[in-house]
Amino acid sequence: MSKPIAITVGDPAGIGPEVVLKTLLKNPQPRHPWVLVGARWSLQRSAEALGIALPAVDTIKAFNEASAAVSILEPADSAAPADFCFGQVQAACGDVAVRSIELAATGCLNSEVAAMVTAPINKEAIHAAGYVNDIGHQEILARLAGVNRTATMLMTPGLKVVHLSTHKSLAQAVEYVRFDTVLDKLQLMHDTLTRWGMQQPRIALAALNPHGGEGGLLGQEEVAELAPAVAQAQTLGIDVTGPVPADSVFNRAINGEFDVVLALYHDQGHIAIKVHNFHQSTTATLGIPFVRTSVDHGTAFDIAGTGAADPTGLLAAVEAAEAIVDGRLT
C-alpha cells in the first residue's frame, strides 16, 4: 500500500472540519490513503452543525496503522474546551491546530507519510495559544524543518504564482525587492519545480512599477534590481523572462507562455489567482523537504458552523499533493 497523505483538520472553530467532512461525503477515491490529523471532536461538532452523522472513520495511533482509505490520527490531549463556540478566537483551538500541523509534519520528516495537506488556521488563535513566533503555516513548517528559505506557490487550473514575500506590509515588501532576494527566489522555484517533475520550468518575473517602470521613469527597481537578477539567473541555466509588466504577465501565463510567475508582493499574486479561479485555488510550500499543499482560504469565522463552506478548495489541494507526489505536476 502506498504511503498515506496527512490532512490536517485546521482550527476547530473555523470551516476546516466542515470542508473535511464535505470532502468525505463526496466519496472520493484517493490514490493514497488519507489520514485526517486533528481532534475527532471537532469533526463531530461540525457533523452535528450540519445535521449529519459523522462518517465511520477509525481512529489510529500512528501513521503506519493507516490501512483504510480514510482514518483519523489525534494529537495528544486534544479534548474539547468546555466553552467551545464556532466562529470565535479560542486559545485551545489554536493549540490543537498547531499540534496537528506538528504531528503531520513530523510524519513527513520521518517519511511515514507521502505529503501533508492543511486546512486553515487562525493567526490570532495560535498566538493566543502561545505560538507567538509563528505567523502561519509556512513559518511553523520552516521551524519544524529547520530551514529559513521558503516560498508560497499559489496554484489554480491554468495559473501558478510564487510570492517573493508573503506576510510583509506593502512598504516592507517593496523594500524586499532586491537583486539577491529575487535571484534566490528564482533559484528556489527552479530547483523545487524541477524536483517535482517539471522539466525546465518557464518562469516569468512580474514587474513592480506601472508599465514595468518605463525604463526608470516610473521607478528604478526594474532597472536596478529585477533585470540584473533575471540576467544572472539565466547564466545559471534558469529559464526566466522579465521583468514583465504586472498588468499582462498573468494573462500571458494563463495563455500558456509561462509555467509560473514570480509576483513581488502578497496581493499582486493573490488577486490574480483568486480572480482567475477562486474556489479551486490552492497553495504549496517551496523550500521544505517534503510536500505540503493547502487550501487558499481562511477559517471564515463568519460562516463557521452554518453549513455554507465550500469544500472545492480542499479537494483541489489534495489532488495537487497527489499530483506532486506521483510526478504529475504540470
Image: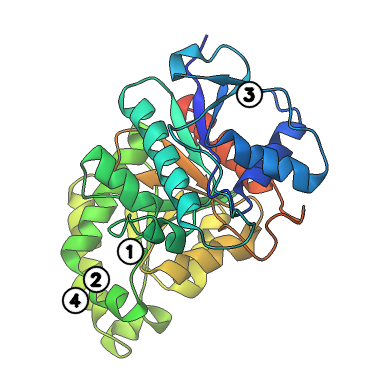
Q: Position of residue 205 (x, y in %)?
A: 36, 62
Residue 281, image x, y percentages: 58, 52
What secondary structure is marked by label 1?
loop
Q: Position of residue 57 (x, y in %)?
A: 66, 23
Farthest residue, direction front: 82
> In screen coordinates, is 121 left or right of 83?
left
- Measure the alpha-carbon separation of dots 4 and 2: 13 Å
- Callout 3 amino acid: Pro
Q: Which disc number belongs to residue 30? A: 3
Badge number at residue 224: 4
Q: Quadrant of residue 77?
A: top left
Which of the two labelled residues, at mark 1 and mark 2, occupies the earlier sequence position?
1
- Residue projecting furthest to the right: 51
What mark, if any, has residue 165 been given in the picture? 1
Question: Is the residue marked by circle 3 packed among few (<14), some (14-19), or many (20+) residues within 10 Å?
Answer: some
Quick one: 286 or 69, which is closer to the camera? 69
Cα gap from disc 1 to disc 4, whole angstroms: 19 Å
Residue lying at 63% horizontally and 57% vertically, measured from the top left: 85
The mark that comes first in sequence, 3 or 2, is 3
Mark 4 or mark 3, which is nearer the start of the sequence?
3
Q: Are marks 1 and 2 in contact (CB under 8 Å)?
A: yes
- Nearer to us in this view, 162 or 318: 318
Q: Earlier in the sequence, mark 3 or mark 1?
A: 3
**Does residue 63 lie above or below 217 as drawn?**
above
| Mark 3 or mark 2, whichever is nearer to me | 3
Q: Amino acid at mark 2?
A: Tyr
